[in-house]
Amino acid sequence: MKKFLNDPVDFADEMLEGIYKAHPAVTYVADDKRCLVTSKLKAGKVGIATGGGSGHLPLFLGYVGDGMLDGAAVGGVFQSPSAEQMYQVTKHIDQGAGVLYIFGNYSGDIINFDMAAELADLDGIQVKQVIGNDDVASSVVGEEHKRRGVAGIFFVYKAAGAAAAEGLSLDEVTRLADKARLRTRTMGVALSSCVVPEIGHATFSIGEDEMEIGMGIHGEPGIIRKKLAPADQVIDEMMERIFAEQDYRNGDDVAVLVNGLGGTPMEELYILFRRVSQLLEARGVTAKHVWVGEFATSMEMAGASVSILHLDEELDRLVAAPANTPFFKHVAG
Amino acid sequence: MKKFLNDPVDFADEMLEGIYKAHPAVTYVADDKRCLVTSKLKAGKVGIATGGGSGHLPLFLGYVGDGMLDGAAVGGVFQSPSAEQMYQVTKHIDQGAGVLYIFGNYSGDIINFDMAAELADLDGIQVKQVIGNDDVASSVVGEEHKRRGVAGIFFVYKAAGAAAAEGLSLDEVTRLADKARLRTRTMGVALSSCVVPEIGHATFSIGEDEMEIGMGIHGEPGIIRKKLAPADQVIDEMMERIFAEQDYRNGDDVAVLVNGLGGTPMEELYILFRRVSQLLEARGVTAKHVWVGEFATSMEMAGASVSILHLDEELDRLVAAPANTPFFKHVAG
Amino acid sequence: MDKITASDIIRLFDAWKTLFAEQREFLIALDGKVGDSDLGITMSKSFAAAAEALHGEGEVAGIAKLLRTAGATMARTAPSTMGTLTATGFLRASKAVDGKEALGATEVAAFWRAFRDGVAERGKAKVGDKTLLDVLDPIAVALEAQAESAAPLAEALAAAAAAAEQALKATESMLAQHGKAAAFQQKTIGLQDAGATVGYFLVRRMAEFVAEA
Amino acid sequence: MDKITASDIIRLFDAWKTLFAEQREFLIALDGKVGDSDLGITMSKSFAAAAEALHGEGEVAGIAKLLRTAGATMARTAPSTMGTLTATGFLRASKAVDGKEALGATEVAAFWRAFRDGVAERGKAKVGDKTLLDVLDPIAVALEAQAESAAPLAEALAAAAAAAEQALKATESMLAQHGKAAAFQQKTIGLQDAGATVGYFLVRRMAEFVAEA
Ligand SMILES: Nc1ncnc2c1ncn2[C@@H]1O[C@H](COP(=O)(O)OP(=O)(O)O)[C@@H](O)[C@H]1O
Ligand SMILES: Nc1ncnc2c1ncn2[C@@H]1O[C@H](COP(=O)(O)OP(=O)(O)O)[C@@H](O)[C@H]1O
Ligand SMILES: [Mg+2]
Ligand SMILES: [Mg+2]
Ligand SMILES: [Mg+2]
Ligand SMILES: [Mg+2]
């Protein structure tokens, strides 16, 4: 295990200590570092909370900030935070307009967010949920509710965050977040494993010349494992599955997120995006907003994912809106 | 070699194609993709050009944009771009106020930038140079001119870019860039090698439990190779060398850059920053500006570096100024 | 023993703590087959924390309060799927036995019925989905039948443990529908469910505890 | 041959191209010891490109123009330290022989003197710094002496190649002061310099070329 760490048990908490020192724009409540919230709440705004395991930076906490989220409950590496932590975050960020939970479709997170919503309800806080399930590889069409949430949740955050910043109601913010969710699809490919600090060895093994298309961000099995193909071919295969999901027409606009899983250099992400862009152009689809970089990682895992958000007019407006968080900044215009 | 690429020979150019598609804020001149320039020059502003090999994203080209640089000549992986390419960039970005070259202290780059300056001079373009040499590990005190340039060049870009955006003269921009250079120090540590696509195997080898303190970003030898120590100890050793370089006093302000070399997850960078912050606090030095992430990489190399810019009033102002480039955005205030 | 008292509850959690410390590696390996290997870690951690919390409270707190503390502690220390479901189970069981000084067969039946209902509600799984619920349901059903026929506590729990063992065996042929295992689809067939194994361990140890005393 | 004509220059670059294609792996390995392994790649690439460009121009262009094309092409295709220094060398050599129809010993001496001065100016290294310059300087000095004593071209170049070989050997005991090798400090002692090796290869092949024809 080649990691910069002290005692593996302290991994998540020491990371958080670093984050609080580096970014005064976020702080924590309930005397618990795992309950991360923005330092400047906006009165009357719908609160947006997220949460999930550590090891995915910038997910989840990295998107707490202006134009995005208000709080994040932080779990151990690949572990859900507790319902209590989610509840503490919820209580703090509620400004009377209610709170929307946006998180990934994992049973641990679902069960804990459900419990937190129950607790918040007892306090009279209105809570809604939108559960990210963008990973095409994790279940077939018709069984979308079983799909895992991966990097595409970024678009749900972006849309919901901008909607809340506009001062929309909880119902409206929820409707728009849900629309972004329904119109987002992701395909990923992994080239290597990662190491959970407390476990100390690779989560799974994969041959020196192999890739796994569709692998999940905790190493969940994908669709097919085969010999690593040239970059263009990998993208062709991934995009074919995404194109099959929705009716992308000539003249349509999309937002594209090419995401590195952690160990893959940015140069390669741009080589991948180059091909994505060629395929979109061939269909007459415009990549109106493009992000290439690390948005949802699995620590040092090598690999990448492509997320496509099928835009309409209101999603276009929300995606384009400015944002300023410790890990994501977008200057409008 | 587990990389997303097509023909290794096309690595840099396909990456550039992806970058131009993703970021309309940059474009190229002289019909040569390796001659990258900003899409919106500002009349009368001092131009700032950089250049260097590919494989270091966001370096070098990633900092072309508002508040930072105007152009970058892009070489093959770890290779200098040509004098002709630098000259073409220079010619395009010159707005009559002259051009400042900021690049790293590597013989290939120096020789080519010198040649480019000669060519530009024939056109009557005034050119000045500031050569980044922040890497403490690469030569002893008194021999600073032999030191390599690494991630700390970010601070030189930031200061010079802000100064040029303020409308200062070439002499002033050069003075400030040079001051930032003289007050910046970097120490790095590598945990693993990287693979140059056209070569296809690791540049160097390092044991499963070893680290090399002071290794250069192309795998140049460092100060000492030894057993990987706990994160805090690694930082203690690195910071001790940085602290020995300048007179950091109680009450002083610094800017800190904790930079990942590519393969190291962000979580670990924050664990490293946590310790940097503790050591600064212990000396009464304030980390007034902090950046943690990937700013100068060596493709998939695992490792990190810490750069410290010893602030004074004018550097503080320049570092704090807004910037908006494809790879680096800073919202002031 | 015929009845479980507050002081017994504290000792029962000690027994569970020992059990999950012993089964740690086994559960890690079991969850590792079609999951993320954390079950052994979370169960040993959460029962250790619960047992310690119960000693902190002491028997004066009474059964319901002790169970509530156990549930709350577990939710905090192990917010994984099974951690939260087991925590929910104990919280609901606490409500079900509120005001009771000691638990006989009837109260233990109410305990497990509430435990099962809590897990079902929180997890939204159905019987047959290859989860913890597949052993909790037969446990509750068996205990209800035993209580109705006025069986002594030890006998009732022995019957429940036997039913759980059978039910656990039956999970082998099921296809996982929930959690990380669901991704493995057909590969889950032939394997006993990890969460169901925990359910069986819980009731078996409880039966042994009552029989031993 | 007594004199090198424009058409010889084209064939000489073909010979250099073949030489660096053959020495590619050797130079990669040599530069790899205390550098970044690119020398074999850049030299084979840049001489191949230069040779091709010269065929494109044809002998009508004349010697000076051909050398200028070679230099410009190399600067473009291999902007590494050695690529740019060699390119500078050819550009300066081009100026030095401007207007000449053919190169005898005197002109070849001027060629290498200009080549050396260009590299020295551009690279700012001194003799003894363990670089290319350490063989270029004795080459230029030897050729000047030979030209002064009116030696025939083949003889003059043979003497220069012999001087270069000695000078290359002498770089082994030097401490690298420039480029990536400088970082390796003491480790460079005992190793012949990679760039100096290229300089020796260049003049030796030129000598052979003149002797063969
Ligand atoms: N929705 C659910 N309802 C009931 N039990 C579930 C549910 N999802 C998963 N389980 C149980 O949880 C077990 C896995 O627990 P655990 O390892 O804690 O999950 P995770 O690591 O995914 O959080 C499964 O074997 C199954 O018995
Ligand atoms: N300043 C200099 N002047 C002359 N020659 C130099 C100089 N710096 C380096 N060299 C030569 O360049 C050689 C390395 O060339 P090359 O591999 O192209 O360098 P790099 O890969 O660093 O660009 C060295 O062996 C040395 O002979
Ligand atoms: Mg990374
Ligand atoms: Mg990286
Ligand atoms: Mg598990
Ligand atoms: Mg080299």
Image (tube, coloured by chain):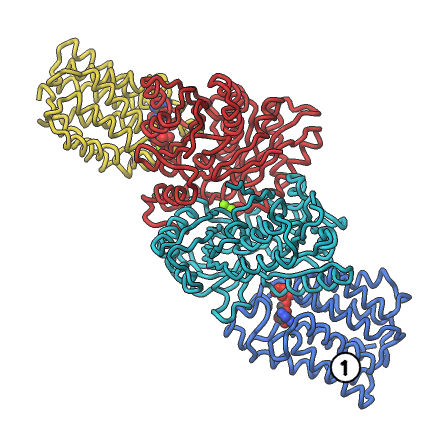
Chain colours: A red, B cyan, C yellow, D blue
- Placement of the C terminus of chain D among the 4 image quadrants: bottom right
Q: Position of residue D43 (x, y in %)?
A: 69, 65
Vertical side of C56 occupied by D87: above or below: below
Q: Position of residue B228 (x, y in %)?
A: 38, 57
Residue A198 visible, this angle: yes
**Furthest residue to the right?**
D60
Label 1: chain letter: D
Toward the viewer: B287 or B81? B287
B252 relative to C197 in the view: left or right:
right
Toward the viewer: B47 or A312? B47
* Residue type, numbered disc 1: Leu
Toward the viewer: B91 or D172? B91
Vertical side of D121 occupied by A169: above or below: above
**Furthest residue to the bottom?**
D149
- Picture quadrant of residue B113: bottom right
Q: Position of residue B91 (x, y in %)?
A: 74, 54
| Mark 1 element type | helix
Q: Position of residue B280 (x, y in %)?
A: 38, 54
Measuring 46% from the left and 36% from the top, which residue is drawn there? A59
Residue D39 visible, this angle: no
A193 relative to D61 in the view: left or right:
left
Q: Tell me if mark 1 has few (under 14), some (14-19) or many (20+) residues whose alpha carbon lies within 10 angstroms of its own.
A: many
Measuring 85% from the left and 60% from the top, which residue is drawn there? D56
- Classify mark 1 as within 8 Å of ligand 2 or not, answering yes or no: no
Vertical side of C26 occupied by D4: above or below: below
Measuring 41% from the left and 31% from the top, which residue is drawn there? A71
The residue that disc 1 covers is D157
Vertical side of C93 occupied by D63: above or below: below
- Placement of the N terminus of chain D among the 4 image quadrants: bottom right
